[in-house]
Amino acid sequence: MMRGPLLLLLSGCVEPTVLTESEYRLLDELRWREPSPDVPPAVQEGNEVWNVPEAAELGRRLYFDRGLSSDGTLSCATCHDVATSGADPRGEPTSRGVDGAPSPRNAPTVFNAALRGQYSWLAGEPSLWVQSGRPLLGFHGMTTETVATHVCDAQDAGYAEVFGDCEGTPPAEVFANVTKAMAAYLQTLESRDSAFDRFMGQDRGSLDPSCLGEEATRGARLFVGVASCNECHNGSTLSDGRSYSIGAGLNGPPSAPDGGLQRFQTPTLRHISETAPYMHDGSLPGLWDVLVYYRDGGAAGSGRAPEIQPLRLDDADLLDLQAFLESLRGAPLPYCWVNDDAYCCTDAGVPRNPTPFGCSERLARPLPDCGGEP
Ligand code: HEC
Ligand code: HEC
């Protein structure tokens, strides 16, 4: 593989990275773009509270509420830990619901959920708030009635503030309102301002690689170059929202009955370094395994996406790609907004009671300093 300008290698990281016009254009398509705060995204259609802060705050509390599961053990955050990756922190290949009930699927991150076009690995649900209700009836073992009863008892004040009186409202309507409030919360969970976004936020032609690191910069070029990952992983979320069969689950013991040649929606790659294990069935334990899988052309078998072909990449190239994928980790969200910490209660994300431990400090990770607005 060509390694970019020799000068760059010899002089450390001070020389500007010169991307070709086409590399710049392709990488620019991947950077974070601010969605309009006024125009409801299509996935929020029918959700009249999608952008109401009080609804998002109610949604936040409901999101962490274990009382919304039949045995009191599970909340949305159990499988989508928004303080870390938005995915299941338990690290098992596939998620388990109440009473350990297995599911054939790995929990995807909920970060940037509002930017997706449709939901689930099979891309079967176009509405974010409808999608938010499904786990309540499935994984959580609830019914519309038990959800309504719990919410009217426990969340009355917050609920009433947004939707009016709970008592006397038909359970199905309370249930729908609960899912709309959750979707309003999910709307706020953006994975953005990653090292990659900050790198791309600089002036074209004087890109400072210290922002991204040389490995990740080379990886970014490979991603849109010989590896052509951006054929499917493109746009702000690094997903085209289309579905392909890339054969994951055919190698090794398939943990999903339909793992074979089924088509799955291209997942987002934002925050990807923290959402292991990978693929719809969690069959690949680490990013390195995913990259080796792609280099080898995916699992054997007919019916695979023709885009998945063996790649001429050496181990150093894969490490560069891995460094690029790691650079897609967004900036941390405010501590209180993504934790259910009684000690650090919030009003719409503002710490009410800042402490030496710092409500907003605890998750802080330094952002690379490389100028340029993210
Ligand atoms: C037991 C683990 C578990 C719990 C609890 C859970 N989820 Fe999920 N979630 C999953 C899995 C697994 C998927 C993928 C399902 C599929 O593709 O069939 C998923 C998918 C999603 C998606 C779609 C993501 C995408 O990009 O396709 C959203 C949004 C979501 N969950 C929100 C929620 C909300 C809101 C709650 C709480 C009401 C919740 N989840 C509770 C495991 C869980
Ligand atoms: C033909 C479209 C396509 C191309 C090209 C492609 N991917 Fe994927 N990618 C997918 C699909 C679809 C999945 C989910 C497959 C599954 O779960 O069975 C996926 C899954 C992944 C995952 C796991 C995500 C997760 O949340 O589990 C990573 C990481 C990934 N791809 C990185 C890459 C890289 C790096 C490249 C280039 C070497 C690449 N992809 C090329 C479509 C593609």
Image (cartoon, rainbow, N blue to C red):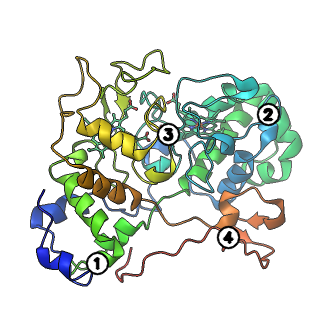
Q: Quadrant of residue 217?
A: bottom left
How far apart are the two marked residues, 1 and 3, measured between alpha carbons? 33 Å
Front residue of this view, candidates 55 and 79: 79
Task: Give the mark nearest the N terminus, 4 or 2.
Answer: 2
Q: Are marks 2 and 3 in contact (CB under 8 Å)?
A: no
| Mark 1 crowdedness (10 Å alpha carbons): few <14, some 14-19, many ≥20 | some
Front residue of this view, candidates 113 and 245: 245
Give the residue type that dot 2 points to.
Ala
Residue denoted by label 2: 148
Give the residue type that dot 3 points to.
Pro
Residue denoted by label 1: 202
Give the residue type that dot 4 points to.
Arg
Q: Identify the secondary structure beneath mark 4.
A: loop
Q: Identify the secondary structure beneath mark 3.
A: loop
Residue 268: which disc? none
| Mark 3 crowdedness (10 Å alpha carbons): few <14, some 14-19, many ≥20 | many
Residue 362: which disc? 4
How far apart are the two marked residues, 4 and 2, measured between alpha carbons? 35 Å
Whether the residue under disc 3 has CB within 8 Å of ligand 2? yes
Give the residue type that dot 1 points to.
Gln
Q: Nearer the viewer, mark 2 or mark 3?
A: 3
Residue 82: percent from the left, percent from the top? Answer: 61, 53
Write down which quadrant ligand 1 falls in.
top right
Task: Give the mark nearest the N terminus, 4 or 1.
Answer: 1
At x 49%, y 39%, the residue is: 277
Q: Identify the secondary structure beneath mark 2.
A: helix
Residue denoted by label 3: 277
Q: Quadrant of residue 7?
A: bottom left
Front residue of this view, candidates 107 and 254: 254
